[in-house]
Amino acid sequence: MGSDEADRDENTRENRDSGVGDDTLYGGSTIRTIETSRTADSDVFNVVHEHGRTYHSYKAGRYLQPNDEREQRRECLWAISMGKFGCLPSILNQAPKNRRSHSCGIAAHQFPGARIIGNDLSPITPPRIPANCQFEVDDVEEFPWIYSHKFDFIHARSIYACFEDTQRVIIEAAAWLEDNGWLEVQDWLVPMRCDDGSWDGTAIKRLTETAVECFRKAGRCNHSEKLPDMFRKAGLVDVKEEVILWPMELNKEALESATLALLTRYGNFTKEEAMELITMARVDLRDTKIHVYQPA
Ligand SMILES: C[S@@+](CC[C@H](N)C(=O)[O-])C[C@H]1O[C@@H](n2cnc3c(N)ncnc32)[C@H](O)[C@@H]1O
């Protein structure tokens, strides 16, 4: 990693003072409450400070985007802007059922009859959560998963470039589905695209190409386009794919969170060089002459 060590600080006390890790903030449930979960490590509640953002501390470095409030707000906006949770509302409304999800808080409100487990590397549980939902901190690439029951619905969102072996994760998820259960992944198709060359010579094109190269170096290649095939290889049937176009305006904030650690850790960029490119790319996104888009 080419990060600035002086800028990093695993600041446990700050988290404790802010209440992170306080069970009462978790609506009475605790991280890893299910009896068969692995044991929680003490560094689950730490954060890694780097270039003005914070990152997960449990298995630090595995995921390249921040986990601070700013990023959580952005993720929430993205989740809400997808317009609905799940492509299968009729199935989801059956109750009571078991679901495993990356967006557990929203889902729990939307489907009060469901029992939902949210999983993440970061303990980013919202302060107030519904009673039908619990959170756990775990690495989904740690196999086998450990649960006391199977799920009728497993959902993951925005997992592009998260995993070393996305196919293996899909196979594990499929194995934890009940008969007639459903797996859903909502994801970006990375990189951004432009069909008419109007982004040639722009910062947004350079940032996109550099990010793709850095993802490759990090061993975190994006696989969204291959997801339908991965589902089939995992033995799933009735595979459906829906592609939508997402407003680029909502992507401006994502430019920094998706690329700052990537460029500084894997692209030999200083923070200043990375921020300069990101800022120029943001300006490009506002330029209506540059026809760049992001399928999702
Ligand atoms: C882009 S965010 C989306 C999450 C958000 N809850 C949502 O549904 O919109 C991807 C999340 O995956 C988590 N993640 C990445 N790699 C992971 C892994 N190996 N195991 C568990 N969670 C992981 C990250 O910490 C991050 O919060």
Image (cartoon, grey):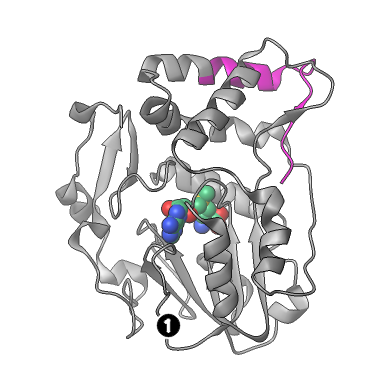
Horizontal side of residue 89 vs 79, given as left or right: right
Residue pictured at 29% horizontal, 28% vertical: 3
Q: Quadrant of the image for the N terminus? A: top left
In the image, what residue type sits under mark 1? Answer: Tyr
Residue 223 magenta-drawn? no
Q: Which residue is mark 1?
A: 147
Q: Residue furthest left?
A: 13
Task: Decide: few, some or many residues near mark 1? Use Cα within 10 Å; few <14, some 14-19, many ≥20.
Answer: few
Horizontal side of residue 210 vs 263, given as left or right: right
Residue pictured at 68% horizontal, 74% vertical: 235
In-front residue for pair 285/70: 285
| Residue 190 point in image, percent of width and height | 65, 39
| Quarter where residue 249 is shown | top right
Residue pictured at 63% horizontal, 35% vertical: 251
Q: Is residue 56 above or below residue 108?
A: above
Q: Which residues are magenta?
A: 278-296
